């Protein structure tokens, strides 16, 4: 036994070594003038909340927006992930030390720390994603979204698409930026019921009580799978998980149910799930998009051009800050009638004839 | 399991005892073994972490592609990638020319809750209890302390004392309940503490969605900021607060409890051999409840250091991963009070330095978590570390040393208590 395993080990080692040796046979690059083309003095930075920049949600898309802006404007953004809430202030101090002109902070948890840093550094600019101060602060620009508008359309589409007459939604943690999706979704379902005199049921969220189903965090996919399985067992066939990566658990549950003969589908949130969660693209009815990357990109570009102001950027259907994603594979399955109705609803929301209200909506 | 063990007719008490003693020996080795293993574990983890940083570095990857035409590039890139990160780790945690020793103050700040909670875990280790519940105890302590801090408006001085008292009591009750359940029902403390962690976490989530704990006019789950009279005074120009002095005081207190007091002697006796302790007249049930309550109180103090020190608000992430880091800290400190104190400082330095490291070199902050996890791995496998440094052979050559590590007699931990 021993000699055999030793021989195998030797063989493996030889293979590994030769692979390494071969991979080192390239030619050395000529040492040339290392000019930093297009470098500028401007620097924008970003501090995440504890979700990190791979959260498939607002940290990730804000970071993408900043990276894009960096490419266009010729700077390499500095980034700092926070592992704990006590890191916020330290990370912001680090960014101040790195001389960042504009620092983007992500999420309401950074509200206090950003406010403190802004007060201590009045000549620096800040932008905070998904949070708005009761009193505006002159060097902080809030980037917020009236997500309920797009979720309303998703709710309507889900209700129209449901064969069982039951749709469902659940959240990660009960915070306004999550429940605003659920409020809009609930109103969209109600609108469908009122217009068509149907009775499509919504599981997982009660708008009047402001209470529903939550998995407790944005991490545990198995919990999302379990919750979704319960909804499917109760007859729901369109599910909207508002829980970042936990939505993948919902995707797994829907796939399992479809393999067993059901025909359920998913409404993704934050980004177009057909593109960002390709594992589940064949069950992706549509997505409620918050275009945080373009908003961050825009704010950074404006700041570099000297046009910073503290007025909140509010993403709406009108400025495409929020949107309903294309149906992709489901395009043929959604009736032309529903599509026309969605277009009409969208126009109505934009011109103000349809009011989508959520207590979590931006106040400005 | 051999068939003879399963035969009902012949109960094999001696055999079972040897197995128990063997397991107990491993337990003692992992939680209270020699400090050298800790030092070596940290060293090996740092080297491996450095290699990992170098392996994921873009420049190292490009230079490896032409290793043979210009090897110097590769090796300088390898060296630079590994060392740059650690240099900035040092600059962020101890000293840099721009800020002087300000980063060291930050290290002390970050280590304060780690030390407090680590002491709680270490104390329980010494009494033979595996306290996974520091997380929950920190959370309950934080809730009580924070509520006293923002809802009650008391005079300066008194307010902070009330906040500390509430936090400590909160942790003590949460830990004491586990001790009570274990003593009365025999339930295992590991299961109990894990479940209590969940209860505490979801209880906090629930509270943060109630009007009583939310800021007026806001719907986000974040509490009002604590009154200025309720927070630890901070050193001007830094985040270091008086809580660190509390941590030093608690370390001295725990050292005194373990080495000088009667209850400390009872804790250690129970930890060494509950049956023998009971025979010797120690009230094991009372000891279990008491040690869990004190461990909880120490974790509660960590919660106080969080809400009244660095954060000054209550959020769902108030305990971060402190309760679990505390286990690592206690293991690294070999469950002695001062060992835990310095292990807490080391982890505080890692955490404080990691922030600077990721901003200045772009090394992901997760690398520090990898190093921490590697440390635990090596501590949990002492023979592995000894084998790596050839220490096993040495101890074979010196037979008198072997029995001390391999098979601690029930009475041995009493003499080990002097490690503090």
Image: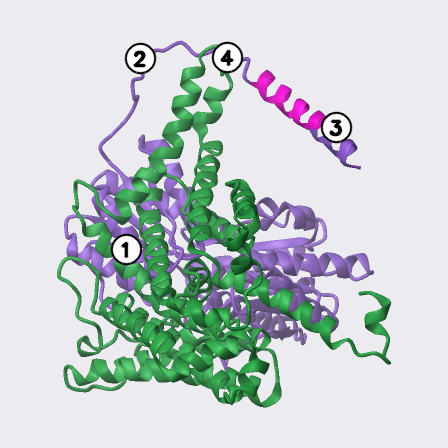
Residue located at (30% from left, 64% from top): B112
Q: Which mark is residue A33?
A: 2
Q: Residues within 10 Å of mark 2 (few under 14, many from 20)?
A: few
- Between marks 2 and 1 in the image, the one whose residue lies nearer the viewer: 1
User: Helix, strand or loop at disc 2?
Assistant: loop
Closer to the camera: disc 4 or disc 2?
4
* Residue B78 sits above or below residue A216 on the image: above
**In the image, is residue A290 above or below residue B28?**
above
**What distance separates the C-alpha of mark 2 from that of mark 3?**
50 Å
- Name the residue located 21 percent from the left edge and 61 percent from the top edge: B239
Q: Taken as a whole, is the magenta stretch helix, strand or loop?
A: helix
For label 3, the residue is A7
Labels 3 and 4 within one chain: no
B26 or B233: which is nearer to us? B26
Q: CA distance from mark 1 to mark 3?
A: 49 Å
Q: Is residue A17 magenta?
A: yes
Does the magenta segment cover residue B379? no
> Mark 4 Cα within 10 Å, few/some/many (few <14, many 20+)?
some
Q: Calculate the distance from the C-alpha at mark 4 to the C-alpha at mark 1.
A: 43 Å
Q: Position of residue B417 (x, y in %)?
A: 41, 69
**Discs 1, 3: same chain:** no
**Mark 1 = which residue?**
B107
N-terminal label among 4 and 1 = 4
């Amino acid at each position: 036994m021993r000699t055999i395993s030793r021989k195998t080990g030797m063989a493996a080692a030889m293979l590994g070594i030769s692979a390494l040796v071969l991979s080192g046979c390239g030619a050395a690059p000529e040492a040339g003038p290392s000019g930093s083309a297009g470098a500028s003095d401007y620097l924008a930075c970003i501090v995440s909340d504890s979700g990190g920049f791979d959260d498939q949600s607002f940290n990730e898309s804000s970071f993408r927006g900043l990276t894009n802006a960096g490419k266009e404007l010729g700077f390499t953004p500095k980034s700092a992930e926070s592992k704990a809430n006590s890191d916020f202030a330290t990370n912001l101090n680090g960014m101040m030390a790195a001389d960042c002109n504009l620092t983007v902070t992500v999420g309401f948890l950074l509200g206090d720390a950003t406010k403190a840093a802004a007060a201590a550094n009045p000549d620096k600019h800040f932008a905070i994603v998904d949070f708005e101060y009761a009193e505006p602060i002159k060097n902080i620009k809030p980037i917020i979204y009236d997500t309920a508008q797009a979720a309303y359309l998703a709710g309507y589409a889900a209700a129209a698409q449901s064969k069982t007459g039951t749709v469902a939604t659940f959240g990660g943690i009960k915070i306004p930026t999550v429940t605003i999706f659920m409020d809009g979704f609930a109103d969209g379902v109600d609108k469908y019921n009122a217009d068509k005199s149907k009775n499509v049921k919504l599981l997982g969220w009660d708008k009047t009580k402001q209470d529903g189903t939550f998995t407790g965090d944005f991490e545990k996919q198995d919990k999302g799978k379990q919750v979704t399985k319960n909804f499917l067992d109760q007859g729901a066939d369109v599910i909207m998980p508002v829980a970042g990566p936990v939505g993948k658990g919902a995707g797994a549950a829907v796939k399992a149910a479809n393999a067993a003969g059901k025909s359920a589908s998913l409404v993704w949130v934050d980004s177009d799930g057909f593109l960002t969660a390709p594992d589940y693209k064949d069950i992706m009815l549509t997505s409620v998009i918050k275009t945080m990357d373009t908003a961050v990109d825009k704010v950074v570009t404006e700041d570099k051009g000297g046009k910073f102001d503290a007025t909140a950027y509010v993403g709406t259907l009108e400025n495409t800050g929020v949107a309903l994603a294309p149906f992709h594979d489901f395009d043929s399955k959604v009736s032309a009638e529903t599509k026309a109705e969605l277009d009409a609803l969208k126009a109505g929301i934009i011109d103000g004839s349809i009011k989508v209200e959520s207590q979590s909506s931006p106040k400005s | 399991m051999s068939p003879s063990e399963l035969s009902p007719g012949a109960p094999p008490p001696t055999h079972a005892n040897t197995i128990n003693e063997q397991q107990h020996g491993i337990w003692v080795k992992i939680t209270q073994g020699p400090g050298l293993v800790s030092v070596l574990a940290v060293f090996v983890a740092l080297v491996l972490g450095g290699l990992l940083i170098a392996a994921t570095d873009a420049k190292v990857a490009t230079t490896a592609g032409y290793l043979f035409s210009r090897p110097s590039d590769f090796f300088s890139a390898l060296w630079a990638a590994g060392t740059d990160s650690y240099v900035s780790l040092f600059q962020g945690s101890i000293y840099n020319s721009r800020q002087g020793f300000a980063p060291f103050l930050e290290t002390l700040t970050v280590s304060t809750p780690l030390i407090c909670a680590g002491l709680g875990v270490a104390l329980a280790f010494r009494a033979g209890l595996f306290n996974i519940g520091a997380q929950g105890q920190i959370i309950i302590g934080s809730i009580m302390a924070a509520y006293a801090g923002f809802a009650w408006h008391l005079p300066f001085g008194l307010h902070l004392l009330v906040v500390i008292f509430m936090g400590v009591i909160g942790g003590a009750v949460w830990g004491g309940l586990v001790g009570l359940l274990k003593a009365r029902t025999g339930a295992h403390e590991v299961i109990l503490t894990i479940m209590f962690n969940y209860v505490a976490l979801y209880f906090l989530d629930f509270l943060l969605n109630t009007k009583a704990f939310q800021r007026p006019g806001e719907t986000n789950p974040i509490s009002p900021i604590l009154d200025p009279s309720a927070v630890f005074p901070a050193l001007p120009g830094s985040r270091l607060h008086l809580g660190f002095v509390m941590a030093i005081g608690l370390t001295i207190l725990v050292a005194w409890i373990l080495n000088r007091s009667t209850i400390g002697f009872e804790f250690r006796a129970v930890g060494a051999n509950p049956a023998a302790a009971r025979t010797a007249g120690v009230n094991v049930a009372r000891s279990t409840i008491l040690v869990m309550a004190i461990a909880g109180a120490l974790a509660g103090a960590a919660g106080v250091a969080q809400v009244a020190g660095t954060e000054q608000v209550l959020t769902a992430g108030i305990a971060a991963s402190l309760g679990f880091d505390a286990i690592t800290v206690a293991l690294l400190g070999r469950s002695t009070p001062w060992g835990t104190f310095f292990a807490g400082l080391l982890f505080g330095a890692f955490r404080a330095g990691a922030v600077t490291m990721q901003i200045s070199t772009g090394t992901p902050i997760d690398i520090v978590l990898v190093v921490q996890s590697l440390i635990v791995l090596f501590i949990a496998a002492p023979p592995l570390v000894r084998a790596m440094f050839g220490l096993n052979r040495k101890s074979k050559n010196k037979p008198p040393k072997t029995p001390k590590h391999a098979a601690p007699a029930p009475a041995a931990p009493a003499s080990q208590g002097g490690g503090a």
